[in-house]
Image (tube, coloured by chain):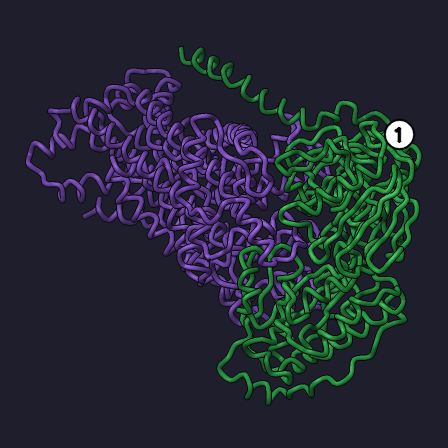
Chain colours: A green, B purple
Amino acid sequence: MRTSRGLLLTLALTPLLAGCFVAGAEGSGSDAEGGSAGRLRVALAVPPVQALSPYSNDATVLSKLSVAEGLTSLDKNGAAAPALAKSWRQTSDTTWTFELRKATFQNGTPVTAESVVNALGHADAAKPKPRVLSDVTLTAKADDADTVTIDTKAVDPVLPLRLASPALAILSDKAYAKDGTVSPVGTGTGPFKITKLTDKSKAALDRYDGYWGGKAKASGIDVTWIADGTARANALRGGDVDIAEWIPTAQAKLLDAKTRHEVPSVRTDSLVLNTGSGLFTDPALRAAAREAVDGSALVDSVFGGYADPAQGLFGPAVSWVTDKRVEVTGRAQAATTAQVEAGTKGKTLRLATYTNRTELPEAATVLQQQLEKAGFTVKQDVREYTRMEADLLAGKYDALVFSRVTLLDTGDAVAYLASDYTSDGVYNIARLKDAKVDEAIKAAAEEGDTTKRRQKIMAAEAEILRTDAVVPLIHEKVVQGISADVEGVLLDPRERSLIDVDTHLK
Amino acid sequence: MSVTSVGTEAGSSRWRVGLGRLAAGTALLTAVAMLPWLSGNDPALTVLRARSADQDPTPGQLAAVREQLGLDEGSFTHLAHWLGGLPRGDAGTSWVSGEAVLPQVTGAFAVSFTLMLGALVVTIAVAALVSARTLYLGSRRRLHRGSGAIGVAVLAALPKFLLASLLATVCGVWLGWFPSSGWAGPASMVLPALALGVPSGAMIGGLLDQALPAAFNEPWARTWYAYGFAPGRVARHALRRALAGVLPQLLPTVVALVGGAVAVEKIFNIPGLGRLALDAAIAQDLPPLQTATLALVLLGVVSGLLIRALRRALLGPALRDGALPALHAPAPSRGRFTRWAAVACALALLALVTGGLLRDPLHVDTAARLLPPSAAHPLGTDALGRDLLARLGHGALRTVGVALVVTAVCTLAGLVLGMAAQVGAGLTEVVATMPAVLAGLLTTAVTGPSAWGAALAVCLVGWTPYAAQAAALLEQERASGHMLASLSFGAGPGYLLRHHLLPAVLPPVLRNALLRLPTTVLVLASLGFLGLGEQPPTAEWGRLLSENQPYVELAPWTVLGPACALVLLSVLAVSGTDVVAVRRSASVRTS
């Protein structure tokens, strides 16, 4: 009697179990054909948040996997290069004309000026607006079938750079639903088209044979999102994937040297000091903190060698900065240890950082010791980023160990400087209000000539560093895990590209 | 508690239990629904952040999000709207992704539920192994010494995430026996089920092992043995008798893994409900969080009913008619080994603490990073070159102190709620499946980040195992013949409590609490990311384990030390109380 009851129970549960795994197996639907030659298996780190909508975090996935393209793209030096537009020229301060190349969407329809106007119009109307369009208003119109004219409300010298942003990818009309959602499934123009997206865990991509730049060498891509860094490294080591991005520094040493590829990243980690309230309103104390802190101590320890000591706000990943660096002058005299102790009497330095990047809490602990040596009394506050962002913006901390992308989606450094260091910057955690800094950033923003603009950016960097509102610590490096069987993976400091037409299995 | 009106009382109590469930579930869902408004964290900002990390939080952008989500309408409008959609099978759309919530939650639930069933199988297997000796010897009346609780304490003290990391590395990467991550078929279920099931199995097995001698000590067992019944038959019935008290533990221990296995889900990249709820909670994405909470509440209630039915089936009419014999353990006689183990653990911990207190736990030396154990650093150094012995020693008092206080509060709350069976049962079922993170979120919403917030949060959900256990044991005790005898002699409630109820309930609950001590340490540390608990760089055992987890393979000693300390603590607690219990019962006998 009892056994038969157990048996019944087992029988009743079997379909349930099977059902669960069928759902899972469907997700890996391409597993069956995964063995077929030429499909790349990729583990990405950040699971999709909005079903791969280009107006969200997911935009970079579209460019990393060569699914969608914009009018332009960025070349190695960070300059605009042709993509769907084969050429462009500036006809007036606020008007640009783009000539389209002959290309087709992945559903077979041709890319026309109308479809470009439509795509840019949707991006402009999106709510909330994509970050790349937050400081510009543009209107696009179709001159003829393959010419698009874009007008900007104010002068925008970096428009071609802006258009390379994955958020401004050109998708076919079918991608844009009435309710404002955008689906890149089968609507892009790139060499790979998404055929299936399973929740936040898997996606399957096939080669798009009609790509204007020729057929891709790989027949398809199977994407798995693995949020945990150790699990990503394990997947690569266990041979479950061919490419695993962002291997944490703690795991990098475990990878075979042949599969470990380091790329300088445009991320700079720095100590941001709150100039608006608390201890660090005093420039002498800020200077003392700057002198006390030694970012190079973090390079070999916390970052396991996968970082460069800081040279300024912009690191070696921004290729043009090296010969344009402006010397910082006019800094405040640093307070001595005795002065620090006297000046901070009874006050603790509230040092914040967040857990989202595993290295930051470790870095904060090293910095705490360095600051204490200089006479500060330090108390840490470490939380998940979203749990403290409001407090950060409200100036509730004295210092923050902060990891920041210095080239935002415009690919232009001014956007970062303006949002983080101008007196009306929306991301001004340092609460810096300095007329000279504002002026220098404004001058850089208005400059149209590339070389001069870069010079002015570096001048603004020096102005910012002069205030000691931010102490750059290190420039991060990203470790990409790439199996020895794969050739042609793009190692992009901006983390925008990874796989293109030439990437393939040996 | 009158015996005459059993029928009507059963009817009304069923109503009251049902009402208790409804009230508890409603209260919980309402609290969750108010989270984004209570938390002081602007949901518009967290949602914007979840959608796009680089997005500038300009007032205009935040207003756009607020308008899109209708955040100004307030929590009750949203709750009503969400509830209104449920009968139509519509649980709303995610604030972050804009996609329908129900398919996501049901998918994740199915995955987590399957994983839980796998863990249940492992749990049963491990529990069977743990209690096999007692069962075998007891059914043959050769059980003269209690079995060692040490193995049980060791297994139960193993941190699940550490076990998961270890299994993923060894069996997944090195040996390649199973996939190291993913959810593609039964093979990918093996390692996570083991990681979740082994400690749970040790816990359940430990409790069963403690209850079995009492069952074998009952008159029927002696009679059956004397009549020459087959040992298997005696064993089966003793098991049936002991299981009834242990079964309710499955709810907070195994069923709760559906929502509470976040760490293991992360390590094995399993798209389960725990991760979904956590992501939703961090982004303050209310509809998925609400729906996940509802799913967990329903799961708790259904499993509670199932377990109740199973217990009724095991104990049968005896429970209803108040004709159970009392389940009292014979005077335990633990071997000398247990005593030695307790002494050895105490000495080892003492050495650890004194050795550690003489050193500096905060001194960072980036040049001495991840050094293996040596004369200078007996337990090695961590990733920042801090001495691990020092960190263990300095963390001991705080860790053990907080964990003991939390456990004491939870045990007390559990006992009280377990005795108030009718209110408590519903509440226990509803809360048992809640992940501690949810309690942490509710706590931060009310108190803000604080040092004692973690303890408070764990207390909010940590009492369920004890309440479930106490309720089950009390039900059996109340149904026992000698209670009836005491009652008819005119015993008052105070007398019953002191002489019958507490003696029956306290020892097993205490054993349970001590077996859960290491888990409590880890759960306390796991809430750190919410800003709850002591902030770094303060040394604390749970934090030591979690901050060194990435270095498991590169520098195993960084986690070995803290893990061994936890095991020592667990063994000391369990064997120590055993020794005390033996002493006391011995002194009672001689007096």
Q: Is residue B311 left or right of residue A438?
A: left
Residue A488 or residue B380, whichever sits in front: A488
The percent position of residue B180, horizontal first and vertical second, equals: 68, 37
Vertical relation: B550 (above or below) A485: below
Q: Position of residue B413 (x, y in %)?
A: 30, 47
Percent x, y for residue B513?
38, 46
Secondary structure at numbered mark 1: loop
Q: Amino acid at mark 1?
A: Gly
Asked if residue B570 can be seen in this view, the reply is: no
**Left or right placement of residue A419 versus residue B421 in this view:** right
Foreground: A317 or B302?
A317
Could you tell me which quadrant the N terminus of chain B lies in?
top left
- Tell me if residue B302 comes above or below residue B257 in the rendering: above
Q: Position of residue B466 (x, y in %)?
A: 34, 42
Sort mark 1 into few (<14), some (14-19) or many (20+) by Cα contacts within 10 Å: some
Q: Nearer the viewer, residue B110 or B417?
A: B110
Q: Classify residue A45 by image quadrant.
A: top right
Residue at 36% x, 17% y is: B233
Q: Subunit of mark 1?
A: A
Image point (32%, 34%), residue name = B21
- On the question of residue B456 being in view, the answer is yes
The quadrant holding residue B585 is: top left
> What is the count of numbered marks?
1
Instruction: Determine whether, in the image, residue B171 is placed left or right of residue A37.
Output: left
Depth check, front residue: A317 or B191: A317
Considering only vertical position in the picture, is A259 above or below A6? below
- Left or right: where B137 falls relative to B104: left
The residue beneath circle 1 is: A210
Q: Residue at x 67, y 45 (%)?
A: A125
Kindly identify the residue that appears in the image at 70 percent across and 43 percent down.
A58
